[in-house]
Image (cartoon, grey):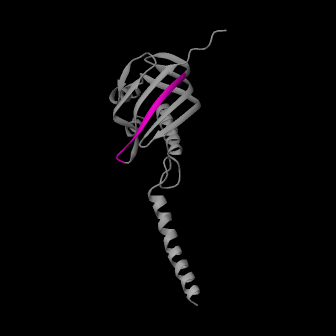
Amino acid sequence: MKSMRLFVLLLVAFSLLVPAMASCQVANPPAGTKAGGGTVEQEIKTLQGQVTQCILKSDTTCLEKYFADDYTAIHGDGNLSTKAQEIENFKSGATKYDSINVREAKIRTYGDTAVVNALAFVKATINGKPYSGDVRNTRVWVKQNGDWRLVAFQTTRVVPATQ
């Protein structure tokens, strides 16, 4: 009889402990995992797609949302631009993308920072001049006040190999 009571007591204690352990795992997810169960990499991949759509539509309201206030971009010609300059270039039509075809993307996360390296074929008009070709770019995302924001972008033209 004593062993049966001890068994029931242990069973009750265990049944109370399991939900508490499960809630700790949700509150403190493993690195790279969000509390909702998805991964940070999946979240960044989704954000990358949303920013690409903003760029293709020249949607400056959308870009305002994703670019951090201290956002900087380094373009293939080496020129540096700020968030305000990038937004103005899209508003004025100085920058207009017709297509962006991402063929490779690698996402790495470091706590509240994510780095995305990509290879894409782009077709655009930049300052009235048509541009098309492969580019490699890097985007740096940082979580600020609970939201992911782009803080840096850098792009480099891929020069076709000569044969």
Magenta stretch?
Answer: 135-145
**Observer-nearest residue: 96 or 32?**
32
Depicted 15 relative to depicted 30: above or below: below
- Spot occupied by residue 137 in the image (x, y as percentages of width and height): 50, 26
**Observer-nearest residue: 8 or 145?**
8
In-image side of 155 versus 145 (left or right): right
- Spot occupied by residue 16 in the image (x, y as percentages of width and height): 49, 74
- Spot occupied by residue 66 in the image (x, y as percentages of width and height): 40, 38
Q: Residue furthest bottom?
A: 1
**Observer-nearest residue: 68 or 161?**
161
Q: Residue furthest right?
A: 163
Residue 58 in sight in this render: no
In-image side of 146 versus 156 (left or right): left
Q: Is residue 94 magenta?
A: no
Residue 50 in sight in this render: yes
Quadrant of the drawing holding the N terminus: bottom right
Quadrant of the drawing holding the C terminus: top right
- Which residue is located at x 41 percent, y 28 percent? 90
